[in-house]
Amino acid sequence: EEKEKSKRLRKSGDLPGTSKLLSKKNLVATEAAVKRSGVVYLSRIPPFMKPQKLRSLLEPFGSINRIFMTPEDPTSHSRRVRNGGNKKRSFTDGWVEFVSKSDAKKACELLNTQIIGGKKGTYYHDDVWNLLYLKGFKWNNLTQQIAAENAERASRMRAEISKTTKENKEFVQNVERAKMLEGMEAKREARRAKEEEGRPAGEASAAKVEKVKKGGERARQFKQTQAVPKRKTADQSESVKQVLSKIF
């Protein structure tokens, strides 16, 4: 019975999930359809507007195939949330592909620099449309541009990661080299202290003096004044006595 039921479903074409799949079918698939299509650029997306909302606002002006909106920078989003702002995701700019380029042109002519409108008090009522029809621009140009930007971003990221890895490696090598030199110096000092313990006091002091000289410290010399010998003073007194005896 189940096999017969599945056969009947296949014949009728009423397979589960078919309608859902067809609703997401690309309407600009053939080369002729691509030529007829037109792309509109939105230089500004109203705050926190989602692609579904944008589609619902623009579909009255023509059949829409695909929409792409650039997400805001994650850093600015986290900063806004940290400062108590809205947690919703926002978008900076976007592209809308109309099935007909004439519909795309009309939408730009009618909506550009006009308020979004709708019921008073709605969230986007006072926001202004910023639409630009991209002449000769097709959706594949956008995908190529996005792919090139992603490749450039990935290349910059790889270069940054490589640079950071190299810097970290050099830092670790310098730390290890410093530890090795400190260990060698500590062993040298321990060996020197052990050698000095086994020497007599005189040799140890001489070794210390030698160490100071090797270390490059200048040996200071102080000039001493020679003491006058007492004998010279006595000779001078005798000569004075002789002179005085001759006078008197």
Image (spheres, helix red, strand yellow):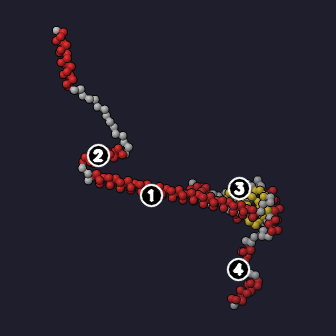
Q: Which residue is mark 1?
A: 176
Q: Nearer the viewer, residue 223 or 81?
A: 223
Report if the CB atoms under discs 4 and 3 are less than 8 Å apart: no
Q: Pick whichever of labels 2 and 3 is earlier in the sequence.
A: 3
Residue, x 54% and y 58% (percent of image)? 166
Can you tell which of label 1 and label 3 is closer to the viewer? 1
- The percent coordinates of residue 114 (x first, y second) are 76, 54
Position of residue 209 relative to residue 70, above or below, is above
Q: Which residue is mark 4?
A: 16
Q: Amino acid at mark 2?
A: Ala
The residue that label 3 is drawn on is 44
Report the quarter where the N terminus lies: bottom right
Checking the image for residue 206, the label placed there is 2
Q: Which mark is residue 125?
A: none
Which residue type does callout 1 highlight?
Answer: Glu
Which of disc 3 and disc 1 is earlier in sequence?
3
What amino acid type is highlighted by mark number 4? Pro
What is the CA distance from the residue labelled 2 to the residue labelled 4?
101 Å
Report whether residue 117 is seen.
Answer: no
Q: Nearer the viewer, mark 2 or mark 1?
A: 2
* Mark earlier in primary sequence (4, 3): 4
Which image quadrant for residue 90?
bottom right
